[in-house]
Amino acid sequence: MADIAVAHVTTPFVSAYPWVAGFGAKYTNPATLPGSNGRALRFSKAGTDIAMGTLSTPFVSAYPWATGFGTKYSNPATLPVNNVNGVVFSPSGADIVTTHLSNPFTSAYPWTTGVGFGTKYANPATLPSSTSDGLRFSPSGADLAISHTSGVNISVYPWSAGFGAKYANPATAPAGTGTDAAFLPSGADLAVAHDATPFVSVYPWASGFGTKYANPATLPGGKGLSVMFSPSGADIAIGHELTPFASVYPWAAGFGAKYANPATLPAADCDDVVFSSSGADIAFATPNNPFIDAYPWAAGFGTKYANPATLPAGAARGIHITSDTSTGQFYYRWRGRTA
């Protein structure tokens, strides 16, 4: 059995459920709630901890996880400066990194299960150029990608218990605000979702950007909000604004022909997308009721799963499944929404 959790904008700001090809009964809320509107959510790879980013202080809250929330960890001694838009654990579980609204746009800490946050790492020598949203470790944990709202819209750094010197920018930058990034599970490609056509850009990755792959023949329907490779690397999913809200393609060092839309579309813009670790399910977080839509996946969408008996309390901004084994593939990205 796995667990699935969503971050949302209304108290209790997080909702979590058992997951076995469908939703179980909602877990009890944490005794100490996150600070406010849920903006970010991530389980550690081992599934022993869960971290959330929020709109107000302390901006990041973390809890032990064992089929339910444990007692909240102490806040980091140096808090992120404001709204945490993204949060991720390193694949080893030894580090936790956040992105946020204002300079330095990212804050990173050592992490120890059972202890919590260590002393904040030094900022990168070359900061992301603006408000930072999505962030993702490469599967090996050797690189960290951060999407942001201006400049080349993506910054990637070597990572070894801290930020290395920023890699050179891609020759062809993503178009418009970068909203998300995802490494192929092999680490050989890096995808970036962004808010201007073609809405997604993918590059070969080998400690640096290769030449951008050709765009998909059928573009996503609107601004790219989230991107995810399946655990096998055989498919790539983009959550976006405008119907059909999600577009999924075969992937083999390039886009195949877009899969048919699900018979029941997601309720609205797909702010986050997640595959289960087996690749047998796909789920989306949306701002409209029922706030979470999940489907069987087998090189195409199956019939939508029943909604959870107790829905998330408001617009869902992120989604994650504990049994993930794809090294850092799932986390939350903020979309610049005001609620």
Image (cartoon, rainbow, N blue to C red):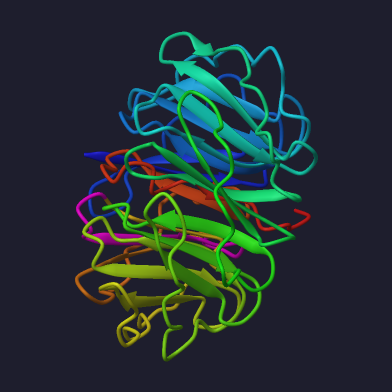
Question: Taking 216 as reference, is 338 above or below it?
Answer: above
Examine the residues drawn in magenta and state their main secondary structure: loop
Give the percent coordinates (x, y) of residue 127.
71, 41
Residue 11 visible? The answer is no
- Name the residue at 78% across, 55% down: 338
Residue closer to the observer: 34 or 110? 110
Magenta span has 279? Answer: yes
The answer to if 14 sits in the magenta stretch is no
User: Foreground residue, 23 or 40?
Assistant: 40
Q: Residue at x 80, y 41 (%)?
A: 102
Residue 157 visible, this angle: yes
Locate residue 147, reporting x and y percent.
Answer: 61, 54
- Where residue 306 sits in the image (x, y, percent)? 34, 62
Task: Find residue 122 and report its image quarter.
Answer: top right
Q: Looking at the picture, does residue 227 appear above or below residue 261?
A: above
Q: Quadrant of residue 99?
A: top right
Percent x, y of residue 159 = 47, 33
Left or right: where does residue 24 sit relative to residue 112? left
Q: Which range is magenta?
A: 277-290
Q: Residue at x 73, y 60 (%)?
A: 151
Above/below status of 333 relative to 120: below
Residue displayed at 49% across by 21% down: 63
Quadrant position of residue 248: bottom left
In which quadrant of the rendered image does the N terminus lie?
top left
